[in-house]
Image: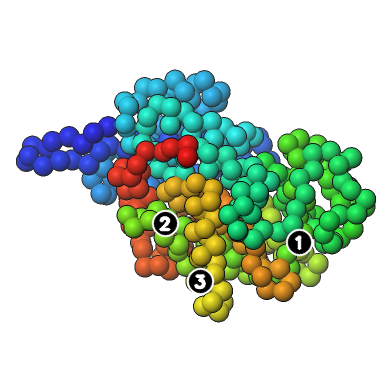
Amino acid sequence: MHQEDDVRGGTMPAAVTLIHNTSDQSLPESAAEEGVMETVEAVEQVLCEQGRSVFRLPLTAPLSAAALTLERLSKGSLVFNLFEGFPGDPSSEVQVGLLLKALALRATGCPPVAMHLGLHKPLAKRLLSAEGVPTAAGLHVRRIEEVPESLPFPFPVFLKPAVNDASHGIGPSSVVQDRASLIERLDDLLDRFPQGVLVESFLAGRELNCSVVETAEGPHPLPPSLVDYSALSPGYPPVLTFEAKWAPESPVYQQTPTLCPAPVEPELSNRVQQLAVLSYRALGCRGYARVDLREDGEGSLCVLEVNPNPDLAPSAGLAKQARAEGWDYAHLVSTILGSAEKGEPWTFE
């Protein structure tokens, strides 16, 4: 939607359509999708306070219905994309991104190729490695029969769904110490996630993450956060499980706070920011993304994964890092919207 003249001869800012998903509370892992409404309300409030006309547009399955909804928008309309995918169908986030591009809508955040790579972790690892980004040694397993008698890296190992996001499928049993435990855990995960499981060398060092936000000057890394595992109960592995991310009432959620700015040496913080920007560019991200990293036992950093369009809620890590940079929430939202409104349209390059 183009800007329109107001009665004083100036211009009014373009209207914004907020697209978002609805959740299915019958699914055991719906908390990640439900949390998007906090973001919708917060972003809407900011934009309204800035004089924008804002229209909420929830998208519901099937994809054909979402397509009909989006087709009603005028070409070039400004869309704040808060869609997290239909419940139980993470790839639908990418499919909606493809619709936004095909309909020539100006949408916030990462283009569909980057969304796809954020979901498909083995492919992302190969692309990151090709750009010189260090990653943990890993193996993509689709069937139990593919597991070699001897892994090309030592135990312990970490298991996560190869094609998913939001820590779905990650729990305390995701860290395994021997081959028998590996086979047992794989059997369960492959039944739930038929696109495979990524088996990686478990990195025993500190875990950090760093958000990157597109500005007029280019990708800008925010102050990193450190995940503090020091309060975890003995025997609970130091990993950010689904429960630790999405269950505020859970003890493990309360025992795994993130500290921002990360209380680490400046050299490490700078290295985290450098790798975050390099990873952001390697996967073709735009708008905003979060890069998760971890040290190995010798203190060398590896990128765990890149998260396009991470949680934008005022209580989430991205907003916390923005505050550490000196940005208030309104500035963060305006910067993300501005990169879509003023930047070049998405491309597949």
Q: Which badge, 2 or 1, is on the more N-terminal residue?
A: 1
Q: Label 3: state its secondary structure.
A: helix
Residue topped by disc 1: 202
Q: Amino acid at mark 3?
A: Asn
Give the CA distance from mark 2 to mark 1: 30 Å
Mark drawn on residue 219: 2
The residue closer to the viewer here, 59 or 302, is: 302
**Which image quarter: residue 54?**
top left
Q: Position of residue 240 (x, y in %)?
A: 67, 58
- Asked whether the viewer can see residue 164, the reply is no
Mark drawn on residue 270: 3
Callout 3: few (<14), some (14-19), or many (20+) C-alpha neighbours within 10 Å?
Answer: some
Query: Who's the residue at 6% across and 41% down the image?
Result: 8
Q: Position of residue 309 (x, y in %)?
A: 49, 47
Callout 2: few (<14), some (14-19), or many (20+) C-alpha neighbours within 10 Å?
Answer: many
The residue closer to the viewer here, 154 or 336, is: 154
The answer to whether the residues at label 3 and label 1 have Cβ atoms under 8 Å apart is: no
- Asked whether the viewer can see residue 235, the reply is yes
The single residue placed furthest to the left in the displayed view is 8
Taking the image as shown, residue 94 lies to the left or right of residue 204, namely left
Q: Label 2: state its secondary structure.
A: strand
